[in-house]
Image (cartoon, helix red, strand yellow):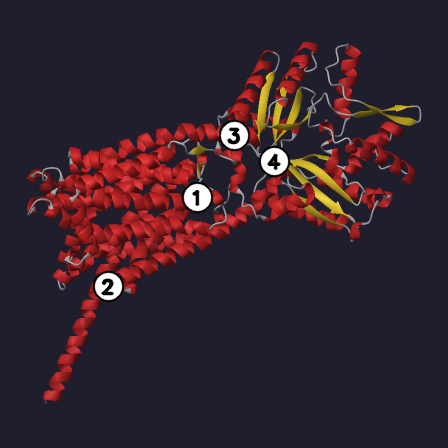
Amino acid sequence: MKETSGPRSLTLRLFTFSQRHPLLIIVFAALITVVLGYFAARVEIRSEIEDLIPKDEEMTQLIRKYKGDATDTNYLMLAVQRDDPFAPEALKAFAAAIEQIGEISSIETVIHPFNIVSFSKRGSKLEIVPPAHTPPQRPEDLARFRELLTNDPIAGGLLISKDGKVLSALFATARLEDSRADMRAFQRIAASLEQYYKVYTTGVALATFKGTQYVTKDLPRLLALTAAFILLIYYLGFRSVRAVALPMVVVVLGTIWTVGFMSLLGYSITMVTIATPPLVLTLGSSYSIHILNQYYREGAHQNGKGRWIVLSVSHIQRTIFLAAATTVIGFASLLSTRTSQIREFGLSTSLGIVSCALLSLFFLPTVLSLLKPPAIGQTKRVLRGGLHRIMQGLSRFTLRHPIPILSGVVLIAVVFGLSVNRIGHQYDYFAYFPSNEKLVQDTRYLAEKLGGLQQLNFTLAAPNGEKNYFLTREVLEKVDLFEQELLDNPYVMNTISFTSYLKHLNRVMTGQYSIPQTRGLILLLARYIKAISATQSADNSFLNVIANDDFSQVTITFRVYNLEEGHYLFEDELAVLAEQIYRDSERLLPQELKGELWGNSLRFLSVSRIVNRDQRVSLLISFLLIFATTTIAFRSLFYGFCSLFPLITGIIINFIVMALFKIPLDMTTVMIANIAVGVGVDNSIHLLLQFRRQKKIYPDDIPRVFENTLTITGRPILLTSASIVGGLLILVFASFVPIVYFGILVSLTLFATAVGSLVVLPVILSLAMRWSAKRSARQKQGADAHGSTRSR
């Protein structure tokens, strides 16, 4: 108390200044809010999948090696289904829709049934059959068109399903910075086909658009529900209009400032940072609760106009500063990660916490000083209300049952050790949506019918860049054998490669679906492939990839899907597939031939490794910084360790729940431990500060120390925990599944840290106090005995 109320205290002078110039403080806060509110209204909302992947990620560099700068190209798929999809009128409508979609500005290239180049044999020569461009009308032409699509190595299984009932078109899109108008046009055109077909759409660009729609819809709803719950906690805790209205003004201003800072920094509201405004709204309320609790505790002892409010705030300011500092450390530690969205989340939330803390310390007391002092009944409710009696009972319980409490903590640690390795990862973007979302259902259906859009590539390079290396029959046969082994993998739906296209042309030429027997025929057919690729037209986009100009490099392109379980491949399955591919390549291909596996999907494999590394590093940083902060603040290593103990308990419980309920680590759940470290330590700090004060007052009365500690700090700890836990549980109403998990797990973790602070921490402190008392008694006895000996 002395260190905060002395005449030379900087904080006391600042508090006094704010009380003497209330209008200045209010106008200053209003001006900041207007400026930042202007920028907050202009913040962008987006949910780009590519933003989840670090720019310097290794797979991104490998993709650039083989594909240049086209790493951001994604695909949209429009598919139609009916028993006879080749009905002339329906087929004409499908072709018209494809043409309209192709005119959308963000569409770069289109692969569809009407622009596939085919071959026919005329005499002893191959003849290129140009694309149909328009749907055939005559029955014989339709039958030939159907046969062409079914037998073509590119169209078969991609543009037409194996049962012949689904037709599709593939649209390559650029990285979409503002795709809303384009995606609405795509959906409108697709819907126009519903009178002819059952229509299906999928693709990363569409998922990004849908994600942005969900984020836009969720944000105001989540903020409104969170604000309503916090208002309820304020009312139940203090039963006062000022205790409801003023703290809500504080956290609303803090949230506006936060979003304004995000806009100024060029940040967007994304599937990760959507949690920032509700978090600031929720966490920022805790500082106001501490201020109000102290305000009502000392309201009955006011002495002078506003002076007692200054002293009241100065008595709690150290708790607020330390709590805000440790919370900022927890979030700021996320700046050490390599994922931009997580870094933006960490910095934005840190700025929000600082804003709410400053508003609580200066703006809230300033407005309170303009109001009448609280009524006696309100102060009595704080000093001797129901929560006060609950805390008295809890203090007696913890002192009487230390062994069962500590045994429970040990049991939790054992369960954690047995279950932590069972936590998986989830980076399937489509799994983030509600299961009843049409996009998710369409994606699964098309994956089963057409093999999906998860494309991988395996590129083989000739030793020393030898030209025409892949025009040798022996090499081609070994590559073909490797490709057949690849097709036997249950995850691989189909392949497109130089060897498969060469075999297709050989069948047209000779009737045999195999690698040509003579080098002359291989060279001839290779020239046809090269001639088509040189046109650089949309329908040849796959042919441009399968072989380079001098045939020193070939690429097997294949699509993958877990057909048995009905989902795309991520994490473990991709890792197993990659390992199998490299193992087969070493076994079946020439020893001098080396291959590299690449593709956009594999970028998420490295994301998993990056996130694991980031979590360990950022968590270690936050623990070390918070330990250092609390150790310096308390000038004690012991108290530094004590402040961390409830955190460790909460984090352990979080991981146990994730393992038991199979909740995966992803871009949001991976941040929970850092949040728990930063926020959960607040309760420990508050309790430890009060414990030290009470210990000085009653050094030999352990029951009195803990009863006073818990009755004074327990009420604000319970109220802030209820506000934070309940406010974050509102996130269960979010549309994105990871945000729902995030809300549940953060709430559970912070609830566990609060219990640790109110139950486990007092047990540890009481045991330490008893041990210290016994040691002092032994030292005193030893000193008395030594004195008696000397006196003899």
Whole-Å distance between the Cαs marked 1 and 3?
20 Å
* Residue wearing tag 1: 344
In which quarter of the view is residue 156 placed?
Answer: top right
**Residue 441's x, y, as percent?**
54, 26
Q: Amino acid at mark 4?
A: Asn
Asked if the residue under mark 3 is in contact with the one under mark 1, i.e. CB atoms within 8 Å, the reply is no
The numbered mark, 2 or 1, whose residue comes first in the sequence reads: 1
Give the number of the mark in front: 3 or 2. Answer: 3
Give the number of the mark in front: 3 or 4. Answer: 3
Give the number of the mark in front: 1 or 4. Answer: 1
The numbered mark, 1 or 3, whose residue comes first in the sequence reads: 3
Dot 1 lies on which element?
A: helix
**Residue 718's x, y, as percent?**
23, 44
Local packing at callout 2 (Cα closer than 10 Å; few below 14, some 14-19, many 20+) is few
Q: Nearer the viewer, residue 75 or 576?
A: 75
* Residue wearing tag 4: 562
Q: Nearer the viewer, residue 388 or 604?
A: 604
Q: Which mark is residue 178?
A: 3
Whole-Å distance between the Cαs marked 3 and 2?
60 Å
Q: Residue at x 81, y 35 (%)?
A: 530
